[in-house]
Amino acid sequence: MANSTDRGRTVTSRALAILGAFTPAQPELTLARICRVTGLRHATAHRLVGELTCWGALERTPSGTYVIGLRLWELGTLNPRGLPLRVRAMPFMEDLHAATRQHVQLAVLDGGEALVVERISATDAIPVLSQVGGRLPLHASAVGKVLLAHADEDLFAEVVRDSLPRFTATTVTDVTELRTALAECRRTGVAVVREEMSTGAYSVATPITDVRGRVVASLSVVGPDPAVHRLVPAVVTAARGISRGLAA
């Protein structure tokens, strides 16, 4: 019997729903699971999954489950905020990581979240929630606050429209307090976050700009030291180096 959510949807929206069913928490799905997540009928999902697999957007594993295909990764590298940015940033991120031995991450604004496009970590670094391809909230992460601070007012209104999620006891969830923090970020050029995403994690971030001076990304260090503000000069120097590379 047809699922009501399968009616009136375009082929494109159905195909995108299938791709959107894959997440960092669920990178491998069965056809049955895809049907449950998307609300598509089995016959529809089976046909579209087959077409996506033939094109390379999906790959079928030996066990019969599906994962995202490399064809999408190839297309993703064409995005100017993807591979080109990472290529320019990597030498500076490696130097920053060598100096701090903590998580160094690069993020860009994607919708109402910060998308982590690159990260370097030491094996003994403090556990964090972020990963490459993962997303962070704009109001509670250092990279997110930098990106939100330099975004337009419409995005801020969208982010604070509903109640801001609380992740720890120190997460900023008051709109006025958040606006003040963003103004301070614009004034100083950095965002310092203390245990807002997870207990025991402290981070500092600063913007990366393109040839026109627009903020296109954010660079941060995340570690266990409450005195993380001492890393501000190193993070700012690395970000400026990346920005000069993008301008060149």
Image (cartoon, grey):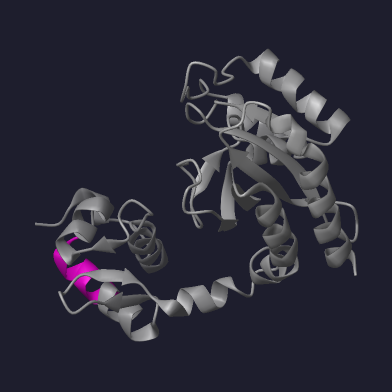
Quarter of the picture holding the N terminus: bottom left
Q: Closest to the observer: 189 or 12? A: 189
Residue 236's x, y, as percent? 82, 45
Q: For the magenta stretch, what is the residue range?
A: 41-48
Quarter of the picture holding the C terminus: bottom right
Q: Is residue 220 above or below residue 203?
A: below
Q: Closest to the observer: 49 or 2? A: 49
Residue 32's x, y, as percent? 15, 61
137 left or right of 24?
Answer: right
Name, please, the residue furthest toward the left: 1
Q: Closest to the observer: 207 or 94? A: 94
Regarding residue 152, the answer to whether it shows in the image is no
Residue 173's x, y, as percent? 56, 18
Toward which corner of the image does residue 246 lie, by quadrant? bottom right
65 left or right of 143?
Answer: left
Q: Is residue 107 above or below residue 233?
A: below
Name, please, the residue furthest toward the bottom: 54
> Which residue appears at 71% of the width and 53% of the height?
96
> Which residue appears at 69% of the width and 58% of the height?
93
Q: Is residue 226 above or below residue 234?
A: above
Whether residue 203 is in magenta: the answer is no
Q: How many marks?
A: 0
> Which residue appears at 58% of the width and 57% of the height?
120
Regarding residue 2, the answer to whether it shows in the image is yes
Toward which corner of the image does residue 45 lie, by quadrant? bottom left
Q: Closest to the observer: 240 or 117? A: 240
> Which residue appears at 75% of the width and 18% of the height?
180
Residue 2's x, y, as percent? 14, 57
Give the main secondary structure of the magenta stretch. Answer: helix
